[in-house]
Amino acid sequence: MKITVFGASGGVGREVVRQALDAGHEVTAVVRDPARLPVPAHERLRVATVADVTDPEAALSVIDGQDAVVSALGAASNKQARTAPVAGPALSAITSAMDRAGVRRLSVVSAAPVGPLPEGEGFLTRAVVYPLLRRLLRDVYADLAAMEAVVASGGTEWTVVRPPRLQDKPHTGGYRRVIGANVPGGSVIPRADVADALLTALTDPACTCRAVGVAS
């Protein structure tokens, strides 16, 4: 499979690149600064520098001829999401470019608090954790919610992956996954497992046009 990865130099994005190469895929890693992509040169890796991921023409240049797209884009802070949102505008450009290129399969990373609380979630999470997170990171989540709306309204075969708090821990492959809901009691997950979920969704028909909750 030929896969374009947006946000390839971020914590989740670089794991997507590594795992996709390990699985035998051809990868186009989209970055602003190639020096920030700590992945060794590989015969199936193309590193593409795109200064503005909200530009549909720039997006088209790295999507045309591909089989699938993975987005690990997101604002680095509440301030950035408030002043210069990333995920929503970028996915608007990316999905437009995908339509023009005839590329259908898309998986994107969002966040658990953007989705609904799972059934049976504990009182502490319902009454304290989720309300606090949604207040502290309201601009980040607003940007991700806008992204989800753009993705769901487009013509792609999309999957939104919603993880809880991300950790820099090794890939386990043993994470929990719930299609159409968040994971009950899910509080953390390694970035490498989120990358696994993003790639797995590309070939799992059960994930098509669905949000998927993941957690350790």
Image (tube, rainbow, N blue to C red):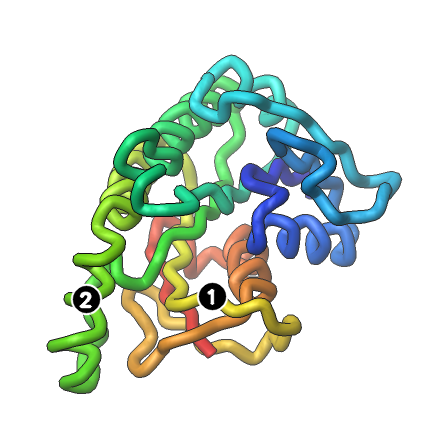
Can you say whether 53 is above or below 137 in the image?
A: above
Q: Amino acid at mark 2?
A: Leu
Residue 163 quadrant? bottom left
Mark in front: 2 vs 1: 2
Q: Quadrant of the N terminus?
A: top right
Of 103 and 197, nearer the camera is 197
Q: Could you tell me which residue is drawn at 88 percent across and 39 percent down?
A: 43
Q: Could you tell me which residue is drawn at 35 percent across and 57 percent down?
A: 111
Q: Which residue is mark 2?
A: 132
Q: Position of residue 122 (x, y in %)?
A: 19, 86
| Residue at mark 2 to residue at mark 1: CA–CA distance | 17 Å
Of 136 and 164, nearer the camera is 136
Q: Could you tell me which residue is drawn at 68 percent across and 41 percent down?
A: 36
Q: Amino acid at mark 1?
A: Leu
53 relative position to 113: left or right: right
Residue 134 quadrant? bottom left
Can you say whether 193 is above or below 40 in the image?
A: below
Q: Position of residue 146 (x, y in %)?
A: 26, 39
Q: Which residue is mark 1?
A: 166
